[in-house]
Image (cartoon, grey):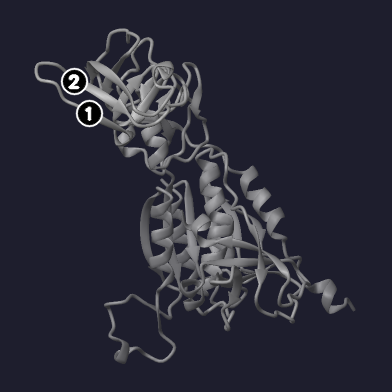
Amino acid sequence: MSSPSAERPRLTPLDEALASLLARARPLEAQSVSTFEADGRVLAQDVVSGLTVPPRDNSSMDGYAVRAADCTSAGAVLTVAQRIPAGSVGTPLAAGTAARIFTGAQIPEGADAVVMQEEAAALPEEGTLGRVRIDTVPAAGQWIRRAGEDVARGDVVLARGARLGPAALGLAASVGFDRLQVARRPRVALLSTGDELVMPGEVAPEAMKPGAIYNSNRFFMRALLQRLGCEVSDLGLVPDRRDATIEALRSAAEDNDLIITTGGVSVGEEDHIKGAVEALGELQLWSLAIKPGKPFAYGRIGQAHLTGLPGNPVSSFMTFVLLVRPFLLALQDATQVAPQPVALRADFDWPRADRRREFLRARRNAEGGLDLFPNQSSGVLTSAVWGDGVVDNPAGQSIHRGDTVQFISFATLLG
């Protein structure tokens, strides 16, 4: 007779599961989009600058362009010989003169410093630009932005695989790109299983039948996918029947890159995802060595990938951010797909080590440490709202107050 441990199915370590998924991600084709519409998209081609930014030395302040040698002591008085607004080009600056200059204007030949207007006093004279008293001793080079200090011609200002944000879009525009080559948006079908599920609005709280619950997974899952720029087909709720599950998956596989199911991936008699996937395609991954999130499936149906997530909301949430999110980014050929943890102090005790790798909902406190949510159950979604991240705790490890732990913020997981 075999021992209970020998009969227990192997749980796949998270890192192994993630590597397996990423190895199966084939980048989607590229498309050209307006730079205005590229926020959150992944670059499919380097952005190479065709110009130098700034193209010429220019002033970073409103003030006066001067020769530092003319202002060796405070109180020097210079003739204002010219006025240079942004977009204009001045004439060479003669010794003993200054140019009234504005932010972004080109520095005239001969000038080697800018004095901000707050450190100078205009001395008006009728019929002329007047004179100016320089109330400081300027250093050569002060308040001058040098040509090319931001971007040199030929620089790769944004690399292929970068996920674009507002600053990146501004940078692309600054070197003249009104369109960008980006990966196509992943097409994702989302469906839930579970006869106990009810949509909010369909039944009032006081009229809920015993055992019924509102379908929260559908809401946060759809929001997570939209944040990743996916085109989401919400297929709603599938009854807990094998034939209905097979038909829903067959239909979803026709024109989607990824199918995401929530619920139905445990081993109960009403859990039909495993059998349905095996009937239509192949199942390549089953059950993870993490907590929460043990019930997880990956497979293929035709050309469509499938990830089956647990029904418990925190388990579903964690498996999405730890596995599905990196996979979707890999489909877009993103360079950075995995979150980066930071080391922080635990201001709590966690004495009961688990054989699985744990992700504990926590939040930073005013003292720079981490507080732990008191109820770490996989069904307590309030823990993910109260917390601002998770402690990534290795299998078999207890935590004592004052220990250094690895913390992954939700800010890095939800964007």
Residue 70 at what x, y percent from top left? 39, 17
Circles 1 and 2 in contact, beta carbons < 8 Å = yes
The residue at the point 32 percent across, 8 percent down is: 94
Query: Marks 1 and 2, how far apart in space?
Result: 7 Å
Q: Amino acid at mark 1?
A: Ala
212 or 367, nearer to the observer: 367
> From what the image shows, is residue 373 above or below residue 20?
below
Residue position for label 2: 130
142 or 261, nearer to the observer: 142
In the rendered image, is residue 272 in sight? no
Q: Give the class, few, some or many, for how many residues have Cα within 10 Å of label 1's Cα (few <14, many ≥20).
A: some
The residue at the point 26 percent across, 31 percent down is: 121
Residue 165 at what x, y percent from top left? 41, 42
> From what the image shows, is residue 196 above or below residue 292?
below
The residue at the point 27 percent across, 13 percent down is: 89
Q: Give the class, few, some or many, for how many residues have Cα within 10 Å of label 2's Cα (few <14, many ≥20).
A: some
Residue 347 at what x, y percent from top left? 65, 76
Residue position for label 1: 122
Q: Nearer the N terminus, badge 1 or badge 2?
A: 1
In the rendered image, is residue 307 in sight? yes
Q: Amino acid at mark 2?
A: Gly
Q: Quadrant of residue 97?
A: top left
357 or 342, nearer to the observer: 342
Element at label 2: loop
Residue 263 at what x, y percent from top left? 51, 70
> From what the image shows, is residue 353 above or below residue 22?
below
